[in-house]
């Protein structure tokens, strides 16, 4: 059973530790704030100038003045603070963020990430992604394993313009949890009822498989 985007976010939420400062990228990563354990203290940061983001608001409770970097309405927790982008990127470039969770269009077995541009399509620019991947020591990518045509996005080499080189540590998809090692992708976990063979067939890069691969624990 392949996971949906919320399940991917739930699995990544298990990587968030007590006391962490965490940056959430646009897309699936923004869902992670909904699933972090209640018994730990975590500060979610958004590069548009928010520290202390909470879960998404319920319908009808949105405040149009409270948004994340993806222009989605958010909530804030007690003690949250607001600041300009210069201060926010000083926080990122100064390596004060413990965990960065990003979306991606492609990730290579070397830990390269492409997540900002598809050639021929209009984009406003790279945004904060370049600063995040250049400064962060702990990057987890939340993404779909294959594109709409069924082609793998877990590759030997990225084909799209790169955002960062050799920076990704772990990838969570609808099929698997993968760790980037010096020898390439290592399969750590598989989605419930998804076979190792299915994951191999959906992956263009070579997978390192060591023994029995456990199923992901989502809840």
Image (cartoon, grey):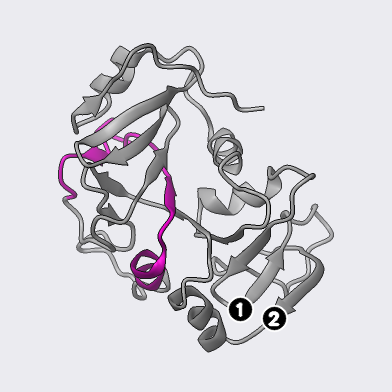
Residue 121 point in image, percent of width and height: 27, 64
Is 91 covered by the magenta stretch?
no
Residue 202 sits in quarter: top left
Stretch in magenta:
129-158
Residue 38 lies, with reference to residue 165, above or below; the image says: above
Residue 29 point in image, percent of width and height: 53, 51
SS at badge 1 = loop
Residue 102 point in image, percent of width and height: 45, 55
The local crowd at label 2, few if under 14, some if 14 to 19, many if 20 or more residues have their Cα within 10 Å, is some
Residue 86 point in image, percent of width and height: 51, 88
Please state the total of marks drawn on the protein image.
2
Q: Quadrant of the C terminus?
A: top right
Residue drawn 41% across the image and 28% down it? 176
State the residue position of label 1.
Answer: 49
Calculate the distance from the C-alpha at mark 2 to the C-alpha at mark 1.
5 Å
Is 135 covered by the magenta stretch?
yes
The local crowd at label 1, few if under 14, some if 14 to 19, many if 20 or more residues have their Cα within 10 Å, is some
Residue 10 sits in quarter: top right
2 and 1 marks in contact (CB < 8 Å): yes
- Give the left or right position of residue 171, taking residue 110 as reference: right
Q: Indicate which disc residue 82 carries.
A: 2
Residue 78 sits in quarter: bottom right
SS at badge 2 = strand
* Nearer to me, 106 or 135: 135
- Give the left or right position of residue 48, taking residue 195 as reference: right
Residue 144 lies, with reference to residue 110, above or below; the image says: above
Residue drawn 27% across the image and 40% down it? 181
Q: Indicate which disc residue 29 carries.
A: none
**In terms of sequence position, does the residue under pointer 2 or pointer 1 come before the other?**
1
């Amino acid at each position: 059973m392949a996971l949906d985007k919320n399940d991917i976010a739930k699995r990544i939420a298990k990587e968030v530790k007590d006391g962490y400062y965490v940056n959430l990228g646009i897309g699936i990563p923004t869902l992670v704030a909904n699933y972090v354990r209640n018994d730990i203290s975590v500060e979610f940061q958004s590069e548009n100038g928010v520290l202390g983001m909470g879960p998404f608001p319920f319908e009808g409770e949105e405040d149009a003045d409270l948004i994340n970097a993806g222009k989605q309405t958010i909530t804030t927790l007690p003690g949250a603070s607001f600041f300009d982008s210069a201060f926010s990127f000083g926080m990122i470039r100064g390596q004060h963020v413990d965990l960065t969770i990003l979306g991606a269009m492609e990730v290579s077995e070397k830990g390269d990430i492409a997540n900002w541009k598809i050639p021929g399509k209009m984009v406003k620019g790279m945004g904060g992604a370049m600063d995040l991947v250049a400064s962060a020591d702990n990057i987890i990518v939340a993404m779909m394993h294959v594109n709409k045509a069924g082609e793998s996005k877990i590759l030997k080499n990225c084909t799209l313009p790169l955002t960062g080189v050799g920076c990704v540590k772990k990838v969570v998809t609808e099929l698997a949890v993968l760790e980037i090692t010096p020898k390439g992708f290592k399969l750590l976990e598989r989605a419930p009822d998804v076979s190792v063979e299915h994951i191999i067939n959906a992956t263009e890069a070579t997978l390192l498989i060591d023994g029995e691969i456990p199923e992901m624990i989502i809840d």
